[in-house]
Amino acid sequence: MNPIEKKLFDCYECIRKKTDFSPRVAMILGSGLGSFADSLRVECAIDYAEIKGFPRSTVSGHKGRFVFGYLGNVPVVIMQGRVHYYEGYEMSDVVLPVRIMRLMGAEILVLTNAAGGINTGFSIGEFMIIRDQISSFVPSPLIGANIDSLGTRFPDMTRVYDRELSNKIADIAASEGIKIQNGVYLQTTGPQYETPAEIRAYRELGADAVGMSTACEAIAARHCGFRICGISCITNLAAGMSGDPLSHEEVKETTDRVGRDFSNLLGKFVATL
Ligand code: HPA
């Protein structure tokens, strides 16, 4: 067994010693969006630190634990805080939690993040359904020996984000009176924010929003057979668009402001799955 596969199954076994919970839906909550987990009927929670070999999230605004429970009748596992490539982890570690949630039985993955708006039609505080992605600026999480038990060597990425799930989010947003945009998410490694020249280049490439996560998780998730949907919270205008410098504080300020709408939208959506 290759070392990446061994670590994955070791971590999985470690979790299985603590809970036999079998989720249907897996969710990753982005920067400042972790409070959504409060709406769950919680069965149990496991700190990443309790799982031997598991990467820890070190970013302020990220808690670092799995929460297991129910939204309505839907069994859900939530990652309250994710692992980022810029924290220094290998890509295989960054996507390890995604794979574990799949091994636990989850079939649908809901990805969320805070992102900078590149599309000039976007405003701060709006949400964007991720319809496609550009991951070309980060290494693939699938590099190295393929884990055949998870998926194929050369997975198709024609439709990463499930259209039916994405349209459902759009319908719920409309009925809740929540404005929602659609677009392409581009992942950078971070941790530095982009330069204005980079943002102009990304816009030319077709990106509508930019962030430091998500696309690599979506690749690993498609590889292991998840149905995926994603929502970005546009926390700021991307570099050079407003003239102001970017900061993590602004990101947190925005997620604090719109967190309620975000939780409402997510909760209504997940309860239908
Ligand atoms: N750039 C990259 N990542 C981000 C941004 C941004 O403007 N906002 C929130 N996460």
Image (spheres, rainbow, N blue to C red):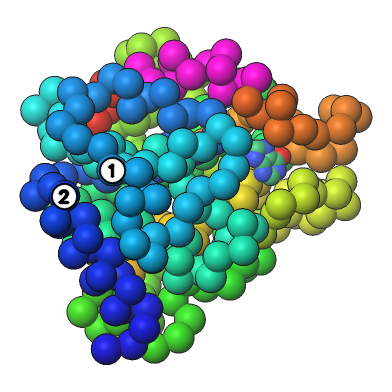
- Badge 1 element: strand
Residue displayed at 80% across by 34% down: 246
Q: Are marks 2 and 1 in contact (CB under 8 Å)?
A: yes
The reply to whether the magenta stretch includes residue 261 is: yes
Q: Quadrant of residue 86?
A: bottom right
Quadrant of image for the C terminus: top left
Amino acid on which disc 2 is placed: Lys
Q: Which residue is mark 1?
A: 46
On the question of residue 96 being in view, the answer is no
Q: Nearer the viewer, residue 6 or 259?
A: 6
Image point 51% across, 37% down: which residue?
Answer: 62
* Frontmost residue, 108 versus 182: 108
Write down the region rendered in magenta: 253-265
Q: Amino acid at mark 1?
A: Ile
- 259 magenta-colored: yes
Residue 262: image quadrant is top left
